[in-house]
Amino acid sequence: MKIFFWILVALNVVLFAVMKSGLLNGGPDEPVPVPLHAELILDAAKSEPASAPAPTPVSHPSSAPASAPVAAIAPAALACYEWGEFSGAEIEKVATALGRLHLGSKLARNDVSHTIGYWVYIPPLKDKAAVAQKVLELKSLGVTDYFVVQDAGAWLNAISLGVFKTQDAAQSFLEGLKTKGVHSAKIGEKSASKPAVMFELSGLGKDEVDKLGALQKDFPEIALKPVSCH
């Protein structure tokens, strides 16, 4: 709009100068006409808006959501295992190896026995004299198949009357002895002669599990079984 205004002003100045010089009139005494489009110049000047200052940008608070709090990382779950069974010289070998892992209360050693059958027996007697007297009693009742335990230990001076694969068979034999008058005999489990050991490992972290896995390679035939942690 400003350019248009100044163009009109310039045209009127030129036109005024030409008419003043008489180039467009009969002579210098002719009346000078009013400059052309003077009202347009005034209107343009009145309608020209004042320069407004550039608007100050309004800063708005960021609408982006604040960073969500980082969730706490749950600790890795602990692992539990059963390792065994070990017997003979392997028991102390693996026990020594596990000791180097410094597991403390996370390691437990359990003795394992397996029932291989059932036996009918008379509990250990006080001494050899008592054994001799009981043997005479058994013979008088018609029992001639017996075996006196002479190995040192908890079963010294016990009298075995029979060994059976099942409990039912042992029970049937015992009932037969009772009918003969033998009332002190009992049924018991027969366990494997060689003791076995099972190791329990509980609450192991990842590093401990890795070390245990490396150790297990030295005993490839012994199962390392994961179990539920109690």
Image (tube, grey):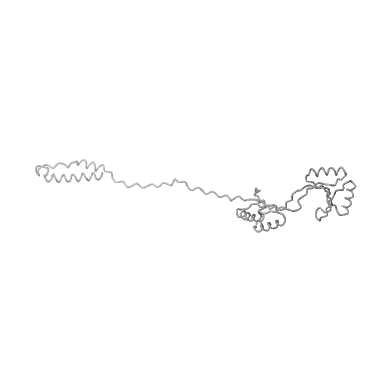
156 and 29: which is toward the camera: 156
Image spot of residue 187 (x, y percent): 81, 46
Image spot of residue 45 (x, y percent): 24, 43
Image spot of residue 106 (x, y percent): 66, 54
Number of numbered discs:
0
Determine whether 8 is above or below 216 in the image.
Answer: above
In the picture provided, is 53 more to the left or to the right than 113? left
144 and 153: which is toward the camera: 144
Image spot of residue 148 (x, y percent): 84, 52
200 and 137: which is toward the camera: 137
Which of the 4 quarters of the picture holds residue 26? top left
Q: Could you tell me which quadrant the N terminus lies in?
A: top left
In the picture provided, is 193 more to the left or to the right than 63? right
